[in-house]
């Protein structure tokens, strides 16, 4: 009987966010199907990660975090991410080699599947150096799970013209490297059809091959937490769950909520909850900007970092900011929310709408990106133009005052069934197992040669020298 392949997952930072939730769910889905799963990461803060990453549910190993910082003076994030991952990869290969050497039964060595996401820098190294030494039959395959091309996430339109030029020169080799490194994968999968189209357009079909879509998932078997009575005396909750980042456009939720008017806001509360990290300057700045926006509109606000303080805020508060809300309390919020507001434009997938539908909560989202694939208009929620605040206000008004409970209950049932069918851990596990079986049944994808790394390193060194010289002159 063939041995179930081992799964080694490489992820840069196990914080709290959509990418982190996805990789945790990938591990859970494959572990539930009998795979031995190990997650390697360069950073995990036990006080700022999902429970499964710290409570022993998953085997999480922190490596490669002793030489390179996450950034240098708020700059060089992409370079440091690559260097940290390569340092991490060295530890991964060393531990796998040691395990293989200590395995007395070489014939029963299981196949090794590497699953890499976000940063593909390690893929060429795994491809070239990661063969299971001492094993005569074990195979190795690499699956890259692409959330979105990194080069499209980089901001290049900030600062003076010379600074933008320096940024462009700095990013050029990394943009090339992203596609080249990804091409070393035996299989590339995307998190949505939207993302698949972007990857093919930006990186080229010859680099990524035949792209499959593996949707992120939620655990539909998770028992709903018990809540002692209604939150805040039964206020009608409009909920936004997202990281405190400008690209998430949380300001839209505040403006649309303000549009209801004082009378219709009575007895309601907008709760803006999500990932917040004091280490991330944008999180700190954007939270302050959102608070200033709300107070400038005449809304009363409060900010809570703990559940206890959140539950004790005054009744007069219109907008409550919850920073890094614990999973259990987030689930409670979802159970009692009337509507989830999902504001990002062209979100690559968006797991939060799926989590809301699992709880039976209708979703109002931007009519772009991943929500087009998860939300069924009028059945599980609504899709509206994120640039038209009034359209969002109208849906809020409809849910709060224009629908009877029977209509809301019907939507709740349809939403739950859709999640069970399309976005469950079981569905993701089956899809990933199918991708793994396909990789193992076919030859490895050809790779264009590790020697190109030397040319890349020389190019990066030259560009960095130029960028540093320009930045020094600017200062």
Image: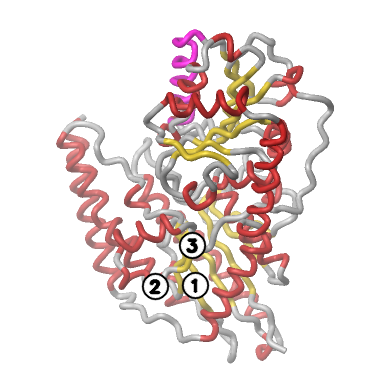
Q: Is residue 308 above or below residue 164?
A: above
Circle 2 is placed at which residue position? 184
The part of the chain drawn in magenta is 282-298
Q: Which mark is residue 142?
A: 1
Q: Quadrant of the C terminus?
A: top left
Q: Residue at x 56, y 70 (%)?
A: 94
Asked if residue 347 lies in the magenta stretch, the reply is no
- The secondary element bearing badge 2 is classed as loop
Q: Earlier in the sequence, mark 3 or mark 2?
A: 3
Lateral position of residue 81 relative to residue 429, left or right: left
Say which residue appears at 66% left-offset and 57% top-offset.
424
Viewer-closest of 56 and 384: 384
Please tell me in which quadrant of the rendered image residue 98 appears: bottom right
Structural distance between the alpha carbons of marks 1 and 2: 8 Å
**Residue carrying label 3:** 145
How far across and down, in percent of the image, does residue 76 sit? Answer: 34, 44
The majority secondary structure of the magenta stretch comes to helix
């Amino acid at each position: 009987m063939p041995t179930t392949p081992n799964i080694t997952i490489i992820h840069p930072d196990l914080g709290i966010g959509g990418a982190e939730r996805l990789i945790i769910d990938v591990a859970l889905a494959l572990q539930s199907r009998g795979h031995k799963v190990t997650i390697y990461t360069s950073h995990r803060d036990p006080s700022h990660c999902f429970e499964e990453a710290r409570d022993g549910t998953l085997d999480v190993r922190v490596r490669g975090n002793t030489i390179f910082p996450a950034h240098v003076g708020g700059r060089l994030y992409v370079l440091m991410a690559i260097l940290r991952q390569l340092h991490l990869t060295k530890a991964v290969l060393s531990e796998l080699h040691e395990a293989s050497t200590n395995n007395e039964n070489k014939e029963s060595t299981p196949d090794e599947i590497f699953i890499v996401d976000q940063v593909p820098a390690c893929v060429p190294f795994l491809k070239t150096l990661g063969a299971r030494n001492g094993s005569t039959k074990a195979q190795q395959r690499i699956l890259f799970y692409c959330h979105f091309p990194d080069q499209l996430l980089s901001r290049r339109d900030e600062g003076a013209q010379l600074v933008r030029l320096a940024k462009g020169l700095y990013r050029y080799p990394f943009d090339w490297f992203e596609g080249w490194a990804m091409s070393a994968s035996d299989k590339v999968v995307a998190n949505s059809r939207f993302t698949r189209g972007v990857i093919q357009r930006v990186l080229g079909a010859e680099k990524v091959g035949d792209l499959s879509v593996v949707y992120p998932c939620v655990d539909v078997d998770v028992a709903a937490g018990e809540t002692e009575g209604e939150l805040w005396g039964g206020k009608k909750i409009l909920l936004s769950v997202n990281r405190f980042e400008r690209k998430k456009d949380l300001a839209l939720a505040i403006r649309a909520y303000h549009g209801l008017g004082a009378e219709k806001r009575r007895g309601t509360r907008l709760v803006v909850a999500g990932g917040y990290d004091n280490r991330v300057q944008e999180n700190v700045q954007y939270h302050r900007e959102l608070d200033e926006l709300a107070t400038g509109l005449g809304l009363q606000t409060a900010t809570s970092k703990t559940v206890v303080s959140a539950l004790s805020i005054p009744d007069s508060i219109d907008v409550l900011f919850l920073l890094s809300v614990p999973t259990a309390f987030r689930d409670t919020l979802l159970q009692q929310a009337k509507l989830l507001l999902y504001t990002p434009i062209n979100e690559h997938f968006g797991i939060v709408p799926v989590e809301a539908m699992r709880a039976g909560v209708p979703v109002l989202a931007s009519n772009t990106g991943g929500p087009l694939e998860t939300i069924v208009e009028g059945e599980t929620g609504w899709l509206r133009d994120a640039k038209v605040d009034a359209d969002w206000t109208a849906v809020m008004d409809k849910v709060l005052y224009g629908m009877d409970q029977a209509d809301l209950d019907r939507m709740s049932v349809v939403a739950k069934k859709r999640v069970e069918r399309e976005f469950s851990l079981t569905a993701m596990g089956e899809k990933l197992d199918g991708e793994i079986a396909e990789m193992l049944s076919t030859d490895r994808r050809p790779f264009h040669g590790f020697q190109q790394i030397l040319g890349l390193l020389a190019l990066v060194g030259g560009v960095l020298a130029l960028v540093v010289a320009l930045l020094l002159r600017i200062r």
